Amino acid sequence: MIVDSHQHFWNFNWLPYSWPTKNEASIFRTIEAPELESLLKEAGIDKTVIVQADDSYADTVYMLETAKRFDWVAGVVGWVPLDQPDEAKAKLAEYSKNPLFKGVRPLIHTYDDPDWIVQDQVIEGLKILASFDLTFDLVAIFPNHLKHATTIAEKVPNLKMVIDHLAKPPIKDKAIEPWAEQIRKAASYPNVYAKISGLNTAADPETWSGSDFKPYIDEAIRCFGAERLMFGSDWPVANLAGDYLKVWTETNKALDGKTQEQVKAILGETAIKFYNL
């Protein structure tokens, strides 16, 4: 089974998202499941995971309603207020009754405090999340957040955590270090996974190809092994620098030379295992 482990939808009639804005004109509109469905069929992708686009209960409800209507949606990563552990616990008790609810992500890369995720009350919220056997998506943008993956892994060792977008490595600058050092440290914890996603929007938007992010994928495979890496399109954000099929095609080109077992893991098996799809 081929799985896209990271895609989004938004409906501006449902709630006022803080992003995208008019500055992202091509995606500043309602974008929903029927628009993606034909692209999935063309790429040969069987299932997807919808990831939250807003820190709100309304967005989580919207995603769960969408997942109920489209059988190719295998899971939803929603939101609860991790910095309010009691409220988070109550909402997780509610959401976890829905088998499509797989985990939580806060949009920490938009917060003024880059260290928000390692506050004591947030760590307590993450411990509660782990107690429900739910997952955590760390939207870590290098260099501000990736370093915190090790802190979280140490303080909440039973939390299944995935680093979104390989933490947006400095692809445009063609630099590997010190990003690779921080990735290696994060990967040393067996409960930490990563997504090969969102790399096209970290590269030159006009000229990128799979060869631009192949060195970063290769490094991630060396660090995590394919069994802790998963493909994600980051659609429709991907449309800011290409489109769904280009991301799919160029990611596969970047995986040329890997074993069949490695490719199968990255394109589906890891996501199935991590999110319990």
Image (cartoon, grey):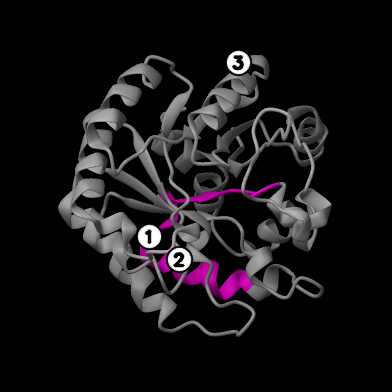
Q: Secondary structure at mark 3?
A: helix
Report which residue position mark 1 lands on.
224
| Snapshot quadrant of residue 45 | top right
The alpha-carbon separation of the residues under discs 3 and 2 comes to 34 Å
Disc ID at residue 220: 2
Q: Which residues are magenta?
A: 213-235
Q: Quadrant of the N terminus?
A: top right
Report which residue position mark 3 lands on.
68
The alpha-carbon separation of the residues under discs 1 and 2 comes to 6 Å
Q: What kind of secondary structure does the magenta stretch mostly adopt?
A: helix
Q: Nearer the viewer, residue 263 or 6?
A: 6
Q: Nearer the viewer, residue 121 or 51?
A: 121
The alpha-carbon separation of the residues under discs 3 and 1 comes to 33 Å
Residue 130 makes an appearance in the image: no
For the point 35% across and 73% down, the residue is 182
Looking at the rendered structure, the kind of residue marked 3 is Lys
Looking at the rendered structure, the kind of residue marked 1 is Phe
Give coordinates of residue 9: x percent, y percent. 67, 36
* Number of residues whose C-alpha sits closer than 10 Å to that of mark 3, classed few (under 14), some (14–19) or many (20 or more): some
Is 126 situated above or below 94? below
For the point 39% across and 34% down, the residue is 80
Q: Secondary structure at mark 2?
A: helix
Instruction: Indicate left or right for 6 with 163 as reference.
Output: right
For the point 64% across and 80% down, the residue is 172
